[in-house]
Image (cartoon, rainbow, N blue to C red):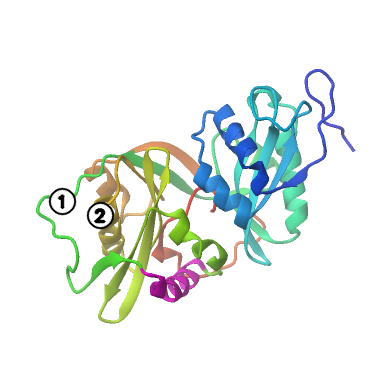
């Protein structure tokens, strides 16, 4: 078994399970890599998902330069045979020491034969490819000040309209999401009312047929998930959510799907980064993915 060490030859501690008490360290790790703090997202993931980390050799109770986490990764389970990976981070001062590979190898052993998905950056893709992940599709982040259609009325249009979600709508949201995603994400979605800044549902004569949420990542309002029967319905949900939030809006979209990317650009958003969705293991047919327009987060493929 290879013992991983820092550049001074000091061995890293074993990989351990992270919990809510590690939030400050996780935030510091995000900042170390130039990410936004993402405190709200870390709070959700550390409480509801499975996070693993490696302490820095000089880690202590304080959080600051030279202490804290050397690396971290988060696993979200949806079924015994399906999970996703996100927030794979290694502190800059410990890069190229094998920590990323160690964390991912640990995680894959932990899930056994389950299919695992993730959003890969260009920097991370070579590692994931070596570990047996393959590309499924592309993803692009569209960010900007959202421009609504001039004169467009919010609310009911074409027999359907959106409204703020209520606690009574959660059963319908869970039903719609499970049918589209092909697995139960209820343990995460039940946290949406506390996690998200806004949630809206799309209602027709047949009842609730779609939903979307907007949550805060720094000064940007991330709109996701967006689950709807059609692209028209998805655009209605996004437009009404964007009208309620402050600052720039972010949509994580499949750039090869026709319904939203060009529309997003016409509404003032620009593609600012690209990732690839990758999968490890079997990729069976599940759910109705045509109804999934944006993820909850790129940390939750």
| Residue found 55% across the figure and 30% down from its top | 31
Q: Which residue is mark 1?
A: 149
Residue 55 vertical position relative to residue 163 in the rendered view, above or below: above
Q: Would you call the spot at circle 1 few (<14 residues within 10 Å), some (14-19), or many (20 or more)?
A: few
Q: Are marks 1 and 2 in contact (CB under 8 Å)?
A: yes
Nearer-the-camera pick, 172 or 65? 65
Q: Which residues are magenta?
A: 166-181
| Residue found 64% across the figure and 22% down from its top | 65
Q: Of helix, strand and loop, which one carries label 1?
A: loop
What is the C-alpha distance between the residues marked 1 and 2? 9 Å
Left or right, residue 202 beside residue 273: left
Residue 118 vertical position relative to residue 180 in the rendered view, above or below: above
- Magenta stretch: includes residue 174: yes
Residue 7 rendering spot, x and y as whole percentages: 78, 19
Left or right, residue 294 beside residue 200: right
Question: Is residue 84 something that shows in the picture?
Answer: no
Q: Which residue is mark 2?
A: 239
Residue 181 rendering spot, x and y as whole percentages: 50, 66
């Amino acid at each position: 078994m290879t013992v991983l060490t820092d550049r001074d030859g000091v061995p890293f501690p074993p990989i351990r399970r992270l919990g809510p008490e590690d939030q400050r360290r996780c935030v510091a790790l995000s900042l170390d890599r130039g990410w936004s703090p993402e405190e709200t997202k870390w709070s959700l993931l550390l409480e509801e998902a499975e996070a693993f980390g490696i302490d820095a050799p000089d880690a202590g109770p304080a959080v600051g330069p030279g202490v804290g986490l050397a690396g971290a990764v988060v696993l979200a389970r949806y079924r015994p045979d399906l999970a996703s990976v996100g927030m794979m981070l290694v502190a800059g001062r410990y890069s190229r020491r094998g920590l990323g590979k160690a964390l991912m190898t640990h995680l894959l052993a932990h899930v056994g034969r389950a299919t695992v998905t993730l959003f890969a950056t260009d920097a991370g893709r070579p590692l994931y490819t070596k570990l047996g992940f393959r590309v499924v599709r592309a993803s692009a982040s569209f960010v900007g000040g959202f421009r609504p259609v001039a004169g467009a009325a919010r609310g009911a249009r074409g027999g359907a309209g959106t409204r703020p979600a209520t606690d009574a709508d959660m059963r319908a949201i869970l039903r719609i999401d499970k049918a589209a995603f092909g697995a139960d994400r209820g343990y995460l979605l039940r946290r949406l009312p506390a996690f998200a800044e806004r949630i809206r549902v799309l209602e027709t004569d047949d009842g609730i047929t779609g939903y979307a949420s907007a949550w805060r990542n720094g000064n940007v309002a991330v709109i996701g998930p967006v689950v709807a029967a059609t692209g028209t319905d998805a655009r209605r949900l996004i437009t009404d959510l964007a009208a309620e939030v402050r600052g720039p809006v972010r949509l994580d979209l499949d750039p090869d799907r026709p319904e939203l990317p060009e529309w997003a650009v016409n509404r003032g958003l620009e593609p600012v980064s690209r990732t690839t969705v990758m999968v490890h293991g079997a990729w069976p047919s599940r759910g109705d993915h045509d109804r999934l327009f944006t993820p909850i987060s790129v940390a939750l493929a």
